[in-house]
Amino acid sequence: MGIVERKEREREEMRELILEAARKLFLAQGFDKTSIRNIAEAIEYSPATIYLYYKDKNELLFSLHEAGFQKMMQEFANVVIVKDPFEKLVALGNQYLKFAIENPELYDLMFIMDAPMETLSCREEAWDEGARSFEFLKITISECIETGHFKSTTDIENASLTIWSFMHGLLSLHLRKRMAFFEDNREMERIQDSFKLFVEMLKCTL
Amino acid sequence: MGIVERKEREREEMRELILEAARKLFLAQGFDKTSIRNIAEAIEYSPATIYLYYKDKNELLFSLHEAGFQKMMQEFANVVIVKDPFEKLVALGNQYLKFAIENPELYDLMFIMDAPMETLSCREEAWDEGARSFEFLKITISECIETGHFKSTTDIENASLTIWSFMHGLLSLHLRKRMAFFEDNREMERIQDSFKLFVEMLKCTL
DNA sequence: TGTTTTCACTAAACACTGTTTATTATATTT
DNA sequence: AAATATAATAAACAGTGTTTAGTGAAAACA
């Protein structure tokens, strides 16, 4: 009696179909400008059908949000080849910058937007994917301590939060157009310079 | 013939009436949940009337956004009594933290939300209020250089952006619930600890 | 097999949203 | 007093997320 298995498979395929259409539309025209009706039209189903597979729009956003973390973690894998822990940390920072600038909509969804965090499954699953990326940062820092790059007294969790805060602040000021009053067009250079300065600060303090 | 003067005055009063009602509703129930119709109802006018005084909802948000900067700058005034420039910088940081945590909706509007930056007058006026607050930070840093707290080689603009980025990152991770995977309820302490660590980093590097 | 039940799907409705347009009533000017 | 300008609005437009009642086909039961 493989019927229930087939149905389950079909259900998963349908969820994937919806998610894929949503992803394309969201990344192409932005989140605000993409409606459930747009997504339904793209997959040639009625809007009501989407609600048979996702509780609401926020849950759809949360699923995309998780996919974003998977993509980011995949790119972080490029960093593990770097041997020296501090260099690895810097490479991780650069990778984070790169990811955010190349995928602004996705970064926005993952770290700035309210909507995906309003879904229930986020509190239930305790935002698993986010925690795993943070863990990656913590491990890299603890390696820096082991090899003597950082002081042994360094509080790993505090240092991680501090580094993440800086990176995220720099990027979100940029993405949300709060650096617009620098009238020159050197925003990208400013970001690079600020990152370099912060790396120097890390080198000297921790 | 004081009629045109009176009309101008009445127009300004009406703009103020709308803005005040908008402010109350926005800060009480959030921006997404406040509609033009809600605001119109609060002041007992039709929704269409609001469009005679503000181009659209974004312009209304931008006006509120400017009022937010005025309030913040007012609170920054508490800091000028601090004599030592570095202590003044730390006090400024604490004041910024305090402002954001006590006025989360306002901070969101000023530094995170997309909407107010989409209005035209923002590009025209080059976001004056924002620039002025940034100037305040720059001046404090240049004082730190003058008194030898910071190296004379420090790039003032870069240091300002770096400090602002950290502060904003820490706060927006908090406000947008991205620190939720720390399952303990020590979020406020974590913010304090991270701030302290960053201050140490400044002390040692710049 | 025929009948019943289950289930995916949808048309239509609900209660909203920001914004525009045509119209009315009032205030100002001629 | 008549003509004009202006402030305010009712109603409409074109959307939004979401729910409900109902339909046709597939699956389960007899």
Image (cartoon, coloured by chain):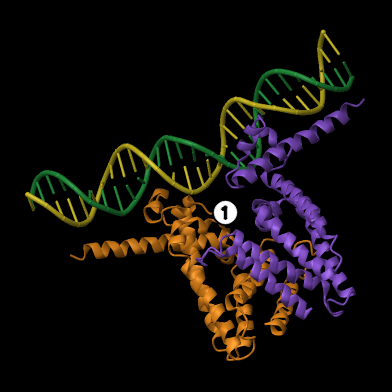
Chain colours: A orange, B purple, C green, D yellow
> For the N terminus of chain B, which image quadrant?
top right
Horizontal and vertical percent position of residue A204 = 72, 84
The residue nearer to you, when weighing B98 against A137, is: B98
Circle 1 chain: A
- Report whether B112 appears left or right of D23: right
Q: Which residue is mark 1?
A: A32
| Residue A146 in sight in this render | yes
Q: Callout 1: helix, strand or loop?
A: loop
Q: Residue furthest right?
A: B1
Residue at (81, 60) in percent of width and height: B79
Residue at (67, 67) in percent of width and height: A169
| Residue A21 in sight in this render | no
Horizontal and vertical percent position of residue B206 = 79, 78
Q: Quadrant of residue B111?
A: bottom right
Q: Quadrant of residue B53?
A: top right
Residue at (69, 36) in percent of width and height: B50
Residue at (79, 57) in percent of width and height: B76
- Report whether B201 appears left or right of A137: right
Horizontal and vertical percent position of residue B98 = 70, 58
Query: Which residue type carries mark 1?
Result: Asp
Q: Is residue B196 above or below residue B2?
A: below
The residue nearer to you, when weighing A135 against D3, is: A135
